[in-house]
Amino acid sequence: MKVAVVGCGYVGLTTATALAWAGHRVNVVEIDERRVASLREGHPPFFEAHLDEAMAACARRLRFSTSHAEALVGTRAVFIAVGTPASKDGSADLSQVWSAVEQIVCNLTRSNVDPVLVTKSTVPVGTGDDIADRIRHLAPHHQLPVASNPEFLRQGRSLRDSLYPDRIVIGGPERARAVLREIYRPIVERSFEPLPGTTHPYGHTTPSVIEVDRRSAELAKYAANAFLATRISFVNEVANVCDRLGADIDSVTAIMGADPRIGSHFLHAGVGYGGSCFPKDTRALHQLARMHGYEFALVSAAIRVNESQRFRVLERLAWTLGGVEGRRIALLGLAFKAGTDDVREAPSIALARALAARGANVIGHDPRAVANARQVLQKVVVLTTSIDEALRGADAAVLMTEWPDYLSLDAQYYRARMRRPIVIDGRNALPEAVRRGVEYYGFGRGALRQPTIERSRVAAD
Ligand code: UDX
């Protein structure tokens, strides 16, 4: 089938590549000409493992253009995958969605069978209804059914998540659902060439297709992300209690996770979540509920816990070093998680700023994200692509992203370079041998004396 995708961020480009891989002909529209030029040469605008190889492998079915008119010819569905960043009040800024809808409507031709308009971007509940109203107003002669088809892909494994999803959610009227069922058939039946190295990563169970009304589909995306975010904040609070009670978070979560009602995923304590989804979607859900007269207390608490979690590193540094002013602190990892060069809402960025504001000399390292970090941190901290340089002469090192590059360093590596081998493991990821060979502090890994700085004071600063 012929489909179009509007927007070339993580969601748009991955969706387009996955659909092309599954056998569809995909026209991708992106308004940024430079982006289109480099996409035509096979270069994604961000780092995502294996995406460029997959794009190259299905290049015949994947076309990039700045023209909506060109991209829409003969398409059965148009996926809107533009950004929905957070506004100042936390609600989603839908300006790119509205502009995409207008462009699509203005570029429809009468000879076309009207395509289904599908929102892939995470949008507030009711946006699909508003889009349908807008279309009725702008193009009364056209009949474009509107569907919500949220994605659940994770950066770093986005192609795999798109081609081997555990569920496909389709919300909207039957006409729209019928087209989407057809589009997703190869993915449901797994009739495509397996992705190299990722043959049926989740076993042989095929994804369930969940067909619902549009509003439920829209809300499900927020609810799923907010639930996962709440889970992380919950486990981080358990870790904070472990520190005070002398219990071990790994043992506690192993026991919790052995209960199938709880499950073992997303129980990893550390500096908290970041990225382009959890922080934005939790705030948007909270704001959305509030606008409709409901105070979503749990989500609001999850956000607060997450925002203070990263500053626990600051407490630990201040406590072990007797203050951070004038100290050289190496931040290992700037990306919000391993496998991506994305620094959006990364705990490392907020921590770097807070440390620098307190007079620390911060040196940040990341194997992939230095260029993006430079744009947001500018001159606040020194950035390097050499781990050796980052650690040399450091008074303390903080592991902020669990890149394999860091996990393979042994204790001697830290000891040989640092002034004092204080290592704070913000991801509870360092191996046992390193933990024993340095002055190690994890999250919820045994007794921690009360920090000298009050938590409330650090957070208020
Ligand atoms: C997330 C959702 O997983 C995905 O379904 C949705 O479509 C987009 O948002 P992503 O942002 O790529 O995906 O990252 P994810 O792997 O979910 O991790 C999010 C953050 O939570 C990262 O900062 C990660 O380090 C943190 N995390 C995750 C924890 O701190 N502990 C955990 O146990 C799991």
Image: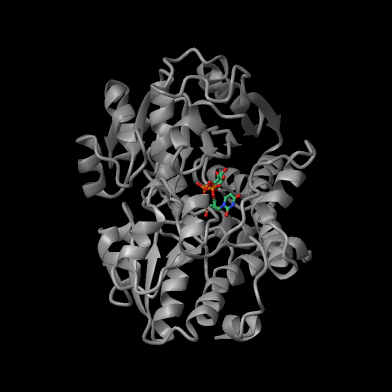
Where 10 sits versus 436, above or below? above
Closer to the camera in the image, 392 or 281: 392
For residue 349, say whether it is visible. Answer: yes
Determine the image quadrant of residue 7.
top left
Which quadrant of the rendered structure holds the N terminus?
top left
Residue at the image position 60 percent from the left and 68 percent from the top: 309
Residue 183 is left or right of residue 242, and the answer is left
Residue 355 as seen in the image, left or right of residue 304: left
Q: Is residue 291 visible?
A: no
Residue 35: give x, y in percent of width and height. Answer: 26, 46
Residue shown at the point (56%, 48%) measured from the top left: 122
x, y percent for residue 339: 41, 45
Quarter of the rendering containing residue 374: bottom left
In the rendered image, residue 424, in percent from the top left (x then y), is placed at 49, 66
Q: Is residue 407 left or right of residue 363?
A: right
> Height in image: 227 above or below 179?
below
Task: Pinpoint residue 255: horizontal percent, then vertical percent.
Answer: 76, 45
For this rendering, which residue is in front, 292 or 23? 23
Q: Number of callouts in the render?
A: 0
Q: Is residue 161 left or right of residue 112?
A: right
Question: Which residue is drawn at the image coordinates 57% and 62% (left, top)?
Answer: 442
Quarter holding residue 361: bottom left
Residue ID at (72%, 65%): 246
